[in-house]
């Protein structure tokens, strides 16, 4: 049974922590879902983690949908959230609604996420009015990191903290069913989680939010470009994978792979005929 918005809300009310991870492909989503995660975000971070882009800005709606479809085929349990990429919702409410709808209709997502506070309230309201679940995202918002002066923590002054609190209140009032806080002090994460009735996820927002999100490439250690301060590495898959690949290359070069155990045998009853066929063509090539 898939996790529902009702269950997520009940977890907040009971004080139960909610888990979320990103996934961008079928095998990863299958593993993440089997681990029992409550929600999977098909994040626009795939631009960097999967597609090798320097930031999240270049990824398109079509690319996001392609990956979201793969994830939805692999994950029957977790609540599925599609990330609206840069310029898929900012310019026009109608466009925002259409693109959000595509994530549900074409990729079987349960909800969408979009970045920004009060400036995207019309978009949030429009998407919610269309019957689509929305998660807001404030704090460090990678799509607008240029305006923020780069990938920097937010809400570290009284003025910026107040601004984020106002954003959070407005997002809840607009009808979003949850909120993601990124890279803010734990005290601010705690205050916002306590003030809002909707679940508040944190990524680098301390231990007091209702739930936590991590990028799977960060926590599994296969995205090596950089590691944010807030990441706990649960594995170092890049090292494991590279070691395995080097061993394969060496085995091929040294003739150790493939061995007899990796090969198929001719059927015993066909062995004589098989040898005659092989010899016939070998001899014909020598003429």
Image (spheres, rainbow, N blue to C red):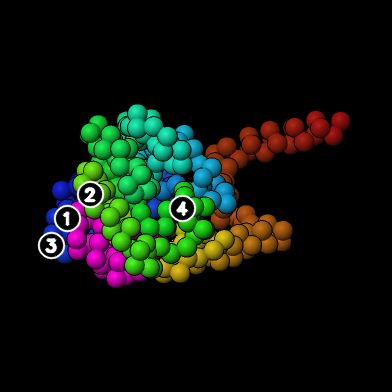
Earlier in the chain: of badge 3 and badge 2, it is: 3
Residue 148 is labelled as none
Determine whether label 3 and label 1 are within 8 Å by CB. no
Q: Which of marks 3 and 4 is in front?
A: 4
Q: Nearer the viewer, residue 47 or 251?
A: 47
What kind of element bears circle 4?
A: helix
Earlier in the chain: of badge 4 and badge 1, it is: 4
| Quadrant position of the C terminus in the picture | top right
What kind of element bears circle 2?
A: helix
Determine whether label 1 and label 2 are within 8 Å by CB. yes
Residue 229 figure quarter: bottom left
- Would you call the spot at circle 3 few (<14 residues within 10 Å), some (14-19), or many (20 or more)? few
Residue 76 figure quarter: top left
Q: Distance between the residues labelled 3 and 4?
A: 32 Å
Measuring from the top left, give residue 267's x and y in whole percent.
54, 41
Residue 142 is labelled as 4
Determine whether label 4 and label 1 are within 8 Å by CB. no
Q: Is residue 40 visible?
A: no
Q: Which of marks 3 and 2 is in front?
A: 2
* Residue numbers of the magenta segment: 181-209
Left or right, residue 152 beside residue 286: left
Give the residue pinned by disc 3. 14
Give the residue pinned by disc 1. 197
- Would you call the spot at circle 4 few (<14 residues within 10 Å), some (14-19), or many (20 or more)? many
Q: How far apart are marks 4 and 1 (CA)?
A: 26 Å
Give the residue pinned by disc 2. 172
Left or right, residue 281 beside residue 129: right
């Amino acid at each position: 049974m898939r996790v529902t918005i009702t269950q997520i809300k009940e977890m907040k009310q009971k004080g139960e922590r909610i888990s979320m991870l990103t996934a961008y492909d079928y095998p990863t989503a299958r593993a993440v879902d089997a681990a029992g995660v409550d929600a999977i975000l098909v994040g626009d971070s795939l631009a960097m983690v999967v597609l090798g882009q320097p930031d999240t800005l270049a990824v398109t709606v079509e690319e996001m949908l392609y990956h979201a479809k793969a994830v939805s085929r692999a994950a029957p349990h977790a609540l599925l959230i599609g990330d609206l990429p840069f310029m898929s919702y900012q310019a026009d409410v109608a466009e925002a609604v259409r693109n959000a709808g595509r994530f549900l209709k074409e990729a079987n997502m349960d909800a969408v996420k979009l970045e920004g506070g009060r400036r995207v309230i019309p978009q949030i309201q429009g998407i919610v009015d269309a019957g689509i679940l929305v998660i807001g995202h404030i704090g460090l918002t990678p799509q607008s990191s240029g305006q923020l002066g780069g990938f920097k923590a937010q809400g570290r002054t009284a003025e910026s903290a107040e601004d984020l609190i106002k954003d959070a209140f407005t997002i809840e009032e607009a009808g979003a069913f949850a909120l993601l806080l990124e890279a803010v002090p734990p005290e601010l994460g705690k205050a916002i989680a306590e003030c809002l009735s909707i679940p508040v996820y944190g990524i680098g927002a301390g231990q007091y939010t209702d739930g936590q999100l991590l990028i799977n490439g960060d926590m599994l250690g296969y995205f090596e470009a950089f590691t944010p301060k807030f990441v706990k590495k649960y594995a170092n898959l890049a090292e494991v994978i590279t070691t395995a690949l080097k061993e394969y290359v060496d085995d091929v070069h040294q003739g150790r792979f493939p061995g007899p155990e990796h090969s198929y045998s001719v059927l015993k009853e066909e062995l004589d005929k098989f040898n005659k066929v092989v010899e016939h063509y070998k001899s014909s090539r020598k003429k």
